[in-house]
């Protein structure tokens, strides 16, 4: 791409890459908590700005190089190239999304704590291969083996897969701010994976509490328990199923 005219930063190519892929967007929103301090008459006499932190968001399209996707089960800290050395960004959500006739996407959400500095934090793993499922037999994307396209390669007995969202989450417990209003520590806990499945109905609706069975899905989509199963009817549309399921470490087969 060549751009002409004004001298400005254009597109996301120079933004930090949190995993390999074709970047779509990146944002970092730095903010403080604003606390109004009033007098006996209720008028604001001062404001305290404390508990500074920044919300991070990143999204990329999956490519054949996306074998370094984040595994939050091993830790929540991630490195961001534009932040100072020792900066702590704690990832709280990592999402893989397959959609009918669209490229697969991956996204990361997290929080940067500017006042937390640690030389060797427990880092999130980068061992997950997001270039899944196997689509070597898909003949409509040429050249092959470059991207993951549509929901091809995954099946469910109850219908035709239109959309699959697989999410890893961590909770954050922040320390109380210090007397000068800084967050100096935080703990991640409560690792969980969830799946939302959208199917064009061709079979029976799965039962809640049953095990979700997806053929061809990546290994970290196994052993989930269905928590909600919904039937949807709309005018001029086929009957659809929306299924929610979750996985916690004790469910490991």
Image (cartoon, helix red, strand yellow):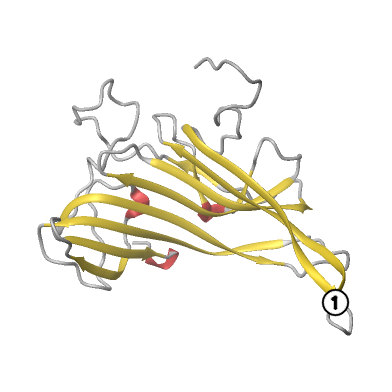
Q: Position of residue 252 (x, y in %)?
A: 38, 62
- What residue is drawn where x is 50% and y is 45%? 70
Q: Is residue 58 above or below residue 72?
A: above
* Closer-to-camera residue (134/32): 32
Residue 56 shown left or right of residue 44 in the figure: left
Q: Position of residue 219 (x, y in %)?
A: 34, 49
* Closer-to-camera residue (140/221): 140
Residue 213 falls in image quadrant:
bottom left
Tell me the quarter of the image containing the C terminus. Answer: bottom left
* Closer-to-camera residue (114/121): 114
Badge 1: residue crowd in 10 Å (few <14, some 14–19, many ≥20) = few
* Closer-to-camera residue (14/237): 237
Q: Position of residue 21 (x, y in %)?
A: 46, 32
Residue 83 visible in the current orientation = yes
- What residue is drawn where x is 25% and y is 39%? 101
Q: Secondary structure at mark 1?
A: loop
Q: Is residue 16 above or below residue 203?
A: above
Q: Position of residue 195 (x, y in %)?
A: 35, 58
In this figure, what is the number of numbered marks? 1
**Which residue matches tag 1?**
43
Residue 2 shown left or right of residue 167 in the figure: right
Residue 248 shown left or right of residue 155 in the figure: right
Residue 200 falls in image quadrant:
bottom left
Q: Is residue 154 above or below residue 241?
A: above
Residue 120 visible in the current orientation = no
């Amino acid at each position: 791409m060549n751009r002409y005219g004004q001298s400005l930063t254009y597109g996301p190519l120079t933004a930090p890459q949190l995993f390999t892929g074709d970047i779509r967007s990146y944002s970092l929103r730095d903010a403080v908590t604003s606390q109004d301090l009033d007098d006996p008459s209720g008028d604001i006499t001062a404001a305290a700005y404390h508990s500074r932190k920044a919300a991070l968001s990143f999204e990329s399209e999956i490519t054949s190089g996306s074998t370094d996707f984040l595994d939050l089960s091993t830790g929540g800290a991630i490195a961001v190239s534009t932040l100072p050395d020792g900066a702590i960004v704690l990832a709280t959500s990592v999402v893989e999304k397959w959609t009918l006739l669209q490229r697969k996407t991956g996204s990361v959400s997290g929080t940067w704590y500017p006042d937390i500095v640690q030389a060797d934090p427990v880092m999130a793993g980068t061992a997950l291969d997001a270039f899944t499922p196997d689509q070597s037999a898909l003949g409509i994307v040429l050249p092959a083996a470059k991207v993951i396209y549509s929901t091809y390669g995954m099946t469910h007995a109850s219908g035709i897969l239109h959309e699959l969202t697989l999410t890893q989450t961590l909770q954050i417990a922040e320390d109380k701010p210090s007397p000068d209003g800084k967050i100096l520590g935080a703990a991640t806990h409560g690792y969980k994976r969830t799946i939302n499945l959208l199917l064009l109905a061709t079979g029976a609706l799965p039962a809640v509490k049953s095990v979700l069975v997806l053929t061809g899905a990546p290994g970290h989509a196994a052993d989930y328990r269905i928590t909600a199963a919904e039937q949807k009817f709309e005018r001029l549309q086929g009957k659809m199923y929306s299924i929610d399921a979750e996985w916690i470490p004790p469910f490991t087969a």
